[in-house]
Amino acid sequence: TSQLKKRLADLPNTITLNNITYNTDSLTNIPATLPSYLTRNLHLQPSHPLSTTRQTIESLFSSALYETYNTLSPIVTVAQNFDCLGFPADHPGRSRSDTYYVNQHTVLRTHTSAHQAEKFRLLDTVGKPGYLITADVYRRDAIDRSHYPVFHQMEGARVFSRGADADIASTVMAEVRGMTVPEVEVVESCPVYEDGNPVQSAKGHTAAEAEAVARHLQRQLELVVSRVFGEAAGSASAKEKLKVRWVSAYFPFTSPSYELEVFWNNEWLEVLGCGVVRQDLLDYAGHSDKIGWAFGLGLERIAMLMYGIPDIRLFWSRDERFARQFADGVVRRYEPFSRYPHCYKDVAFWVPGTFHENDFMELVRGVGGDLVEDVKLIDEFTHPKTGRKSMCYRINYCSLDRTLTNEEVDSLQEKVRAALPEKLHVELR
Ligand code: FA5
Ligand code: MG
């Protein structure tokens, strides 16, 4: 409670994001470095790799069937991001250590699914059975080459109306058979239902209906990755089919749920989560007569492969040498410009009863910004007598644009050390 009091005393009464002022409260945890990201809109910057990747994928969905939304505000209610999607009250994703809270009612969206309910409700008004949403999303997370607290997702959804059609399952399966056959080899496929049983509520759709929708979803997404990764491989490589696999997954708002993994550079990489939309969500949106699917994919993950971009921070670079390579909007392999030296600094401390690693990560990022390439836990032990726990982290400082001086790195490290006892109540060793 003394920690809480201190935090509240330090906290400004309001926070302004995209020109709107919000009251803060004990849940507010937006660092000063974050608001500037809300205006970057990388997915809309002409010829930025994330924008080109978005357009490549959008072009695979007919605009007659899918409405696109690319400018939805990242500031959403807790209800939109979690409650309406059926997240249980104790879901870890809701915690302050994982999610950026503007205040107790408002968060920075952690996924594009935050817009599902409102866009489902609009389907009839818009007059299309599907939609695509591309947007920036925010998560408190570790720091490394593939994790950044801001990234981009594309969400897609499609519904099928039962209408007078008693046998919607056959109608959807007929549509599946009419779809282009994707150039991929599905090397593993999980069963439609993990345990052989529909998990849907009794008043939901039938197993046959869910299976037809799941097949439509899988075929559509296999097509997306085959086109996108086909483009990445170019014509040079021997015409070997891209290997993909379907893995059973869990999301509170879909059932059954899957993840799609792609075999790339000798490893399996998760590129998206998806599933059959839970019937109660469609019911609430006024669509008891429809069944449908939804997916959410990570644009950076896909763009990094399409362009061979090795570090997620590069997307945010304002270095001319980055932008220049893609100015004509053509997908081509990224040419690394010279790398600058790494400088490693360790910091060790005793932690109080509760310690969330993400708080430490954020503190480091707050001080070092993009000059911190990654942070690794290198040692952890509990004192045999006192029971106190000690952690040692190694911070890797490296700029994408220039060589850092020793003085500069020392001063950053000193700031990290100074902030630790003050902000996280740890004791430096
Ligand atoms: C979701 O966010 C769900 N909303 C996806 C979904 C949508 C499921 C609709 C069902 C229906 P997940 O947290 O797994 O799921 O993220 C989806 C994708 O975003 C991942 O597969 C990955 O490609 C990308 N992603 C997730 N975390 C990160 C990260 N820290 N950095 C970069 N990409 C990420
Ligand atoms: Mg996932």
Image: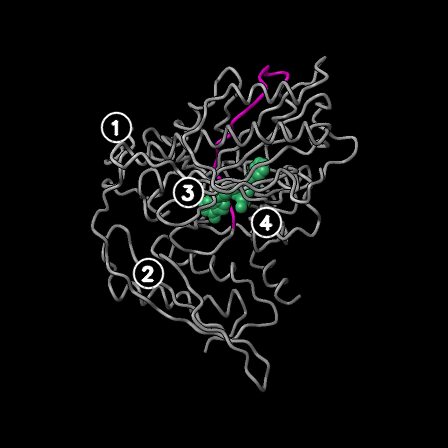
Q: Residue at x 51, y 29 (%)?
A: 219
Q: Residue at x 58, y 60 (%)?
A: 7
Q: Is residue 232 one of those drawn in magenta? A: no
Quadrant in which residue 118 is drawn: top right
Q: Separation of disc 2 and disc 1 at Cα? A: 32 Å
Give above or below for 146 relative to 72: below
Q: Separation of disc 3 and disc 1 at Cα? A: 22 Å
Q: Amino acid at mark 3?
A: Arg
Quadrant in which residue 119 is drawn: top right
Q: Are marks 2 and 3 in contact (CB under 8 Å)?
A: no
Say whether residue 157 is visible: yes
Residue 62 x/y as whole percent: 48, 18
Q: Earlier in the sequence, mark 1 or mark 4?
A: 4
What residue is shown with label 3? 301
What residue is shown with label 1? 328
Name the mark nearer the viewer: 2 or 3: 3
Q: Are marks 2 and 4 in contact (CB under 8 Å)?
A: no
Magenta part of the chain: 124-139
Q: Which mark is residue 62?
A: none
Q: Earlier in the sequence, mark 2 or mark 4?
A: 4
